[in-house]
Amino acid sequence: MAAVAHSRQGTPGEAIDGVTPRLVAEPTSGDMCAAALAAAARGRLSTVIRGGGTKSGWGRPVDAIDFVLSTRSLGDLLVHRDGDLTVTVGAGMPLARLNAKLAARGQWLPVDSAFDGTTIGGALATNDSGPFRHRFGTPRDLLIGITLALTDGRVVKSGGTVVKNVAGYDLGKLVTGSYGGLAVIVNATFKLLPIPAASGTVIGRYVHPIAAAKALEAIRATTLEPAAIDVQVNPRECRVFVRFASSPAATEAQIAEMSALLDGATVARGLEERALWTSHERDIWTRSGAILRVSWLPASFANAFMAIERAGVDAGAAAELAGRAGVGSGLVRIEGDEAAQIAAIQGLRAQAPAVDHVVVLRASRAVKTAVDVWGMAPSAPAAALKHAFDPAGILNAGRGPL
């Protein structure tokens, strides 16, 4: 096997989806990343980029991984231009740590994640987002510049004032959501926002998702400006969460108007609100079963949930949903044996367009082998892009989506 400078033998604690890598390297600079990638490409080493490891199980199953490149040592806050509301930060910086540092200047990067250890690079590579996506978008929408290490040994920059050897490409948009299949993210520059002066969440409770869907229609008909509109549906309850974050006066006025719209409305503020959203984002990951990411038309929540429920019932499985009701994206947990999970996934994919883009995030190896994780092969343009950036085809070790 070809050698990679400064690499060492992998350990079971560094396994990717249960597979221990043969070699691991932890570069401390973009140049070292690029050199490591070039050596891996020459040796045709199947390579996975790892940040905090919170999503290392996402992707198609593999039998062997030759090389893991860790971005953990690229974790510095490089430049905080607080007057311009921008920051440049290393890919290995944990998102939570970055926001803790920015808070000292009354600013934040409005990206939330269900995982404590999510890094900046990992959030970009998966385009991971949480409830604040409703108001602020995904990491892709906040990115204004990026530095990448390529498999040919180059370090390139895009955004801001410097674009080297890649004129015509918006590299940030290309690599965001590519799951490390095109390049290594070395650092990124984001636009920031002031931390809101006040925040509060109105919770509505419903006996059936159809009633919740009617409430969501009523919310869309208002002129209110929520920071998040989320829904949680399980066999026990259906809840709608509407969060406002603005000036104290504007926040309270909107909370009062929203409370009159939702059934059984209660309001959470302060530590209670923080605990509410933390639980909402993370609880689905703490329970057993397969977890899928799905999308639907925001105005068609009722049809989407009926499709989810039908797929679960037909497969003999239970289905739970948590997600962004305002933008039409969420997570579905399928509880049942492997055969039931496989049948439910196939059933959901047959429900398009009521539910679309069904991606398997967490499941057993048997389930991920039986139903393609991504649900489709890359398009011809995506395959051409992959070949242009990774001609040896080493990145992400065949786990997709590129």
Image (cartoon, grey):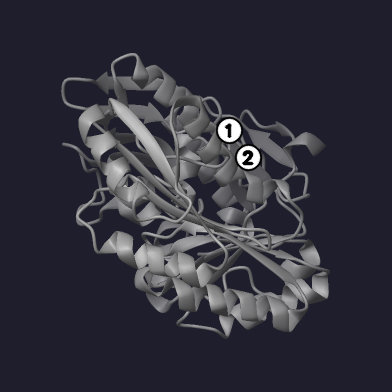
Q: Nearer the viewer, residue 280 or 32?
A: 280
**Residue 44: x and y, percent?**
62, 55
Q: Is residue 366 left or right of residue 175?
A: right
Image quarter of residue 208: bottom right
In this picture, is 89 found above or below 210?
Answer: above
Residue at image coords 29%, 24%: 107
Image location of residue 214, percent across then percent down? 40, 69
Q: Earlier in the sequence, mark 2 or mark 1?
A: 2
Which residue is found at the position 43% from the left and 20% from the top? Answer: 100
Give the residue number, with chain letter if any, for mark 2.
53
Q: Quadrant of residue 218?
A: bottom left
Residue type for callout 1: Gly
Q: Are marks 2 and 1 in contact (CB under 8 Å)?
A: yes
| Up-down relation of residue 334 to residue 64 (above or below) | below
Dividing the picture into quadrants, the one containing residue 269 is top left
* Numbered label attached to residue 300: none
Q: Position of residue 253 (x, y in %)?
A: 24, 39
Task: Say whether residue 48 is left or right of residue 63.
Answer: left
The reply, left or right, for residue 123 in relation to residue 44 is left
Residue 215 sits above or below residue 370 on the image? above
Q: Is residue 216 visible?
A: yes
Q: Amino acid at mark 2?
A: Gly
Q: Read off the residue under disc 1.
A: 117
- Measured from the top left, where is residue 271 in percent x and y? 50, 25
Q: How many numbered markers are drawn?
A: 2
- Find numbered disc 2 in the image and state the secondary structure of the residue it sits on: loop
For label 1, count other residues whose C-alpha is less than 10 Å away and answer few (under 14), some (14-19) or many (20+).
some
**Mark 1, secondary structure of its residue:** loop
Give the camera-side residue of 225 and 99. Answer: 225
